[in-house]
Structure formats: structure tokens, C-alpha cells
Amino acid sequence: MTPPRRGPLGRVADFLDDRTGYRALLHEALYERVPGGARWRYVWGSTLVFAFLTQVITGLFLWANYAPSAQTAWESVFFIQHEMAGGWLLRGIHHVMAQAMVVLLALHLLQVVIDGAYKAPREVNFWLGLVLMMLVLGMALTGYLLPWDQKGYWATIVATNLAGIVPVVGPSLQQLVIGGPEYGHHTLTRFFALHAGFLPATLVLFLVVHLAVFRRHGLHAKQPLTKPDGMFWPDQLLKDAVAMLAVMAVVLGVILVPAARAMLAGEAVHPGHLGAELGAPADPSQPYAAARPEWYFLFLFQFLKVFEGWGATGEFVGAILVPGLIMAAMALMPIVGGWRLGHRFNVAFTLAILAGVGLLTGLALREDYYALWVDRAALAEAETLHDQTGGDRVKLAAALGGDRAKATAIERQWKTLEKVRRSQAFLDAVKLAKADAARAVELAGRPERIPPAGMLAVVRGDPLMQGPRLFAQHCAGCHAHVDPLAADAEAVIAASSAANLFAFGSADWIRGLLDPEQVAGPAYFGNTAHKDGEMVSFVRDDLTDEATWPRADIDAVVAALAAEAGRPVPPEIAGLVERGRELVAADDRCGGCHRFRDNGAELSGEPDLTGWGGREWLVGIIADPAHERFYGHANDRMPRFGVAAEGELPQLTREQIEILADWLRGAWYRPSQR
Amino acid sequence: MPRRPVDARSPRDAAVVDPDHASASRRGFLAKVLAVACGGLATLPPVVAGLWTFLDPLRRQGSAATFLRVADLAAIPDDGVPRQFPVIADRVDAWTGFAAEPVGAVYLRREQGSRAVQALSATCPHAGCFIGFERAVDCFRCPCHNSSFTLDGGIVAPSPSPRPMDTLECRVGRNGQVEVKWQRFRAGVAEKVVQG
Ligand code: FES
């Protein structure tokens, strides 16, 4: 047969084929017989290859912008996610496709087992598939750490500690993957090398063999064959491609649905908030109570809780032995499948495992989100009884006057209550984590950008993030910090033993102080040693005398002090600042007791009002309230946080005190509204 | 039809290549061994160099445990309730040196009227999460797998944790500074083994 006449393109193709034999190769690759015709049930393997390809493509482009080190990993991921054009989409696809891949893996495995495609002569290929599965899970695990945020950091601590309990080699293995005795640069570089180098390279190797062996045995056709044989190209490939498109559509859907929702609700859409999350930078010294692995590892996480009370054995059994045995049992499937009823056993086993995984995942989620669907009001009585009795059964019986039935019911409610509390703690932690993450991103976007020491240094010095923590730890034992208009304000304030410092220094706060109704209340001096002091009697007796203290004069003092504190002066009294300063200084007014600027008042237990409530003043009083400039000898119980004897540590460092002062003043970075 | 190519591996062709079949197969064997040996030897250096470096972390030790000042006695109310304190230490992470960085946290507590301070590491002995203290129920709780511990760090059964919270050596100086021997312990084992 003479070949038809060819154009120049055809001649080039002929030339190439002559030298490379590409046509035979292509033919070999595409013209595979599909017994019984193309079917949808055969698409899973191809979608997996597609998912992997997606990960390679997005991964390489992420790589081009990622810098693995403890001071640059979070920072570079932040830059990708929030600053680079399209970065959110790139990262979003990589992140969501990784999850899709795990789902597809499960489906592919299920289909292979149900169809009996693992049986002779395809045993080896089944084993190769299991190896591929482990590699994919390994990439998922290592990828979680790379942003170096709190979430990935703490999940990795748990994962690597579990690796450490493998008998004999465990501790060395752990030290090798984290790259030393502590987590840091080399944990990142090693996880990155595993995630983007060792594991995918191995995966490609196995994938090539997997596909080659697959072609050798041909497709495992599901009987009965109802249609005539088809060809891989284009019949099956069309179905595969449609499935790939569907997978991609789902992935994009997951990324974009929140955007669509926001748009429908008429809110602004921030692309940086779409796709993959980025938590606050990893901080080994900051508790992270929202630590959870990625959802597809939740079952393993939950499984560890099953072995309560087993001690170290439980952890070994739960984290190493049982998962190992399950993998071994799966590896034996091709052999078991050859026995009578073996195939049925395998199918049942796989379904049971998947059901178990589903159940554990469900349990984990239920435990975490329990508080969302339990009506806490119904537990109110049990809660009060718990507080009264301290959870003691004997005391409970006594409190209920021996009502046994009621006692049992209450005890059951205590169990529920305990679960609600745990769940609530988790939900609160998630909320805090979200707020921290948002704040870290906000700070990273400051015009002065991220310093070379990395974002952690900035986060650790941020009054908005650290202020409440420091306050809770060092001040909240006595002081309240609660908006008086908040729902629980009254109770919180009543329980405190020093002034409520919410909005300290603001016009509202000063007004409260100068209000005869409030000054001796729990929000000011009511629970302190000054409750019968001179300030209280001054406010109650002198200020109420309208002849000496007309309304306008009090307003003027409020204006002057708010100005002193650097707080905004309400416009209606803004004109009174100067008059206020005179009053504060005057020796027949405030200046009779308080020093103000150069009014010459003696310092004897009444705070100097110069710069009152400002940064320097606040730093000073926190550091040393017993200084003569503040309360001097009249200091109540407030510790001298910044003072220490020679060779001792003060309770708070200078930076910590500054953070507290800035937080109390509401002085922290706010992005300018664009 | 083209001629079948000569294949030295098949015995029939070996005779074509070399009539003296026996010596040929001997020489062929030697060639195979040599080829594998040379190839293997050539590949060895990069692999060895790679592994050598890769294994380096095994010989790295954590910084020797030292007593670190974490607080002042006055900062620990003597009500038996644990308070959390950051542990500040100089730290080296591979090539980066940090001066006075928070490296972890401890819980300190003391009983009424006592000067003796008990120090508990905040790292969970189960798998390393950060243990929280819950004031409402007066016990420690790990947010990860629900291990609970009593005020003095004892296990609240049943617990996934294989051992109580790790106590750290703690001493109180004459002028009241509280020093803690900062150490990490292996997670997930019943005995308290120092890590690194
Ligand atoms: S890490 Fe604390 S309970 Fe598991």
C-alpha cells in the first residue's frame, strides 16, 4: 500500500517517527482494548492520576514562591495567600485537591476490592497500589506542616511523637524527621524535602510500575459484559476526562462557594480568605487548644482516645499496632481472595474498616461540636448543683435530701455537662485561633512589612493579641476588664476585687469614676482598700455640691483627663479641656490632693495626674504602683510587676508591661480603611 | 525479512559470538559482576554523602538541661492552684541563635504557707500537646485526647496518657527566685525518659 501524499507537517511527523518510533509508543499507550466497553466505574484510577498531576503542577508553582525556614515559611505562605495575584487560587486548589485525592483513593480502593480486581494475576499491582496510598497519605501529613502555622505545628508534634513510640527505631526516626532534638528550620526543610522530593519521586516510580503492570494484565472488566469491547482512546478516556472535569469542578466549588455566599449576602469578598486557611504563626510557647489533624486523619486521632486507661500500651496499640495490622490484612487480601468465601470476606472487611473510619470521624466531630446542639439551659440546675457540691456524690445526695432518682438523673446530667464543657472549650479555642490568625495576617500587611526576625516576633509583641493573655494571667485575679454593657458584666465586675479597667482613661470611664453612685461600686473602688478613702468621699460629698462643682466643671475635668490619657475627647466637651486642666491643677479642686504638672502638690498616696492614663503613666503604675508618683504607701494589694531586687526577675518584663499598657489604652495597629 | 539480531545472552548466539562457549560464559559472568560493581561503586559516593548528612541530627543533642529562672515566689499565690509561666531561654535552631526566647511553659504551684514550689511541664506526656488548666473544675486537661490530671499532675483515670504530668526539678533561691530545670521527656511511654 502506498502511503497517501503528505503535507510538510506529515513529513516532519514521518521523520520524527522514523527516528523515535513515537507512533508505536502512542499507539501502545492509547489503543488499549476495554472489554465490555468504556464504563464510568473505571474512572477512579484516572481521576487519581489527574489529581496527582494537579498537585504536581500547583505544587511546583507553590514551590517557586515558598521559603522553608522557621522565619520565612509562614511569611512566604502569607505572601502567596494574601498578596500575590492568584496565590489564593493556587494554594486553594493544592489544598482542596489533596483532600479530594484522599477521597478518590478510598473510592478507587473500594472499587478494586468490590470488583475483585486485586485477585490473581493482579496481586502485585494491588500491593503497588497500597504503597501508593501510603505515599499519598505521607504527602498529606508532611504538607500540613509546611505553612508553619499553629495548626500544622501542633498536629506535627503529635504525629512525630507517635512515630517516636515505634519500638527500637522510634526515637531515632523521630529525631531524623524533625531534624534534631527540637522542632525548627530542619523540621521544615526535611518535611519539605519529603513532601516535594522524596515522596513524590517515589510515587512517580511506583505509579509508572503500577500503570505498566495494569496495562500488562489489561483492565479488570466487571462481569457480565453487556456491550461490545471498546477502546481506551477515545471511549474510556472521554469518560475519564469528564470525571476529571467533575473533580476539578468540585474542588473549585469548595474554594469558591464561600465567595458566592458572601456575594449573595452583599458582603465584600477577600480572595485571601478563600481556599486554604493560614493560622497564626507556630509558637511553641503558646497553647493551642484547637489542635486537630486534617479531617481525614481525625479517625486516627479519635482512635487514640479509645485506649483510655491502657497506659503506654494503649498508645502503641492505637497508633502503631492496629493500623499496622489493618495494612497487613489489606496486603493479604489477594491471597485471602483465592480462598472460598475469601472475596466476600475481603469486601466485608474493607467495608467494615471504612465504616469504622467513618464512625470514629463522626465521634470525633460529635465530641468537638457537642455544645452546638445541646441546650445548656436544660442543664442549669445540674450546673448549679455541681458548683455547690464540687461534683461530690455524697454532697449531692445530701443537697437533694436523699432523692435517689433525682441524684442519678443529676449525675447523668453532670456527664453531659462535662462533655458540653469540653466541647465549648474546643469551640472557644477555634474561635480564638481564628481571631489570632486574622490578626496575624492583618499585622503582616502593615506598611512596614515583616521584620527579618519573622512574624512570630511581631505577634508576640502585639498588644491586641498578647494584652488579653497577659491580663488574664497577671491582672484578672483582681481587675475586671469587661464592657459594662455586656450581658455578663455585672457578675464579672461583682466578682472582681479591683477596678474594671475596660476603656480605662476614656471619657466614659472617668465619668463613672466621678459618679457618686459608681465610685464606691465594684467597678471602681468598691472592692478595694480605698472604698472608704478620700477619693470616694470627695466624689460623694464635694462633687455633688453643685455650687462648687457645676456640671460644666465636671465635664471639663472629664475632658482634661481624657485628653491627658490620649483618648478622644467627646466633641460636646472638647472645648473644655483647658478649663479642665486648670481645675485639675487648682489647689482647691483636684490639685488639693493630686499633683498635676507643676501645681506643687505633695505626693502622698494620691496618684500624680500628669499624663494620667497615658502610656508612660500606665507603664509606670504597672511597674511600680507603690512608687510615690502613684499610690505610694497607700498602694492596696497591687504587685510591683516591674520591680525586682538585685539579681531577681521582675514578674513582668519591660516589653510585657508595655504590651499591657498599650492594650489597656486601646493603642494597637489598625489597618487604615481603604 | 531482516535478520534476527545477535543476542549474546542466549546460549545459541553465544556460540555465534564465540565458538569457545565455556570460556565465553565465564568471561560473560565476570563482565556482569564487574559492570554491576563499577556501576554500584560509582553511585555509592553520592548516596553515602547524602545519608551521612541526613543522619547528622542523630548526633545532635538538645542543649544540656540547666536551671532557668522562671518566676518569683511572690508571683505564685500559695493557694495550691497552678499558675502558668513561660520558660525563657537562649535557644539555637540550627543556624539561628535566639536570645531569651519563650521556649515552652511550666505550671508552678505551692501550698498554703509553703515555700516549696512544684513545677509541672505543660507538655502532655501522651503525645505532646499543650496542657491547659481549667479553673472551673480545678484540673489540668489536655485539649487533644482528653487526658486529665489532678492539681499536682497525677493521672485522672481513665486517661490516654501513660503517665502523670512530668514534674520538673525546681528550687527556690534565698531571695525568692524560682528556678526550674528545663527538660523534655519522651512522649507516649510509661517511664519518664529525658529526650534529646
Ligand atoms: S497529647 Fe495530651 S492527651 Fe494526647
Image (cartoon, coloured by chain):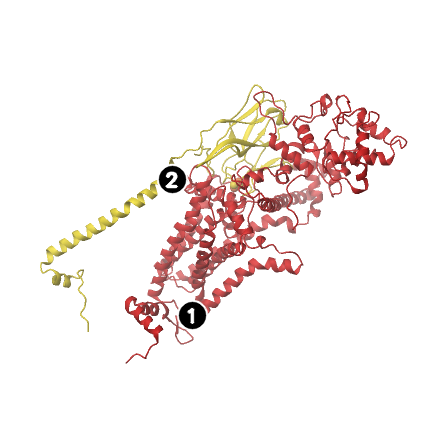
**For residue A604, what is the image quadrant?**
top right
Calculate the distance from the C-alpha at mark 1 to the C-alpha at mark 2.
49 Å
Query: Which one is in front, A448 or A342?
Result: A448
Evaluate if marks 1 and 2 touch, with contact meaning CB atoms under 8 Å apart: no
Kindly indicate whether the residues beneath marks 1 and 2 are on one polypeptide chain: yes
Circle 1 residues within 10 Å: few <14, some 14–19, many ≥20: many
Residue A514 showing in the rendered view: no
Which numbered disc covers residue A558? none
Front position among marks 1 and 2: 1
What secondary structure is marked by label 2? loop
Residue A594, image x, y percentages: 77, 25
**Residue at the spot 51% in from the left edge and 47% down from the top edge:** A76
Chain ID at mark 2 = A
Callout count: 2
Residue A559 showing in the rendered view: yes
Outermost top residue: B174
Chain ID at mark 1 = A
Q: Which residue is mark 2?
A: A168
**Tint applied to chain B in the drawing:** yellow
**For residue A623, what is the image quadrant?**
top right
Is A554 left, or right, of A291 in this rendering?
A: right
Which chain does red denote in the image? A
Q: Quadrant of the N terminus of chain A?
A: bottom left
Outermost right residue: A547
Q: Which residue is mark 1?
A: A236
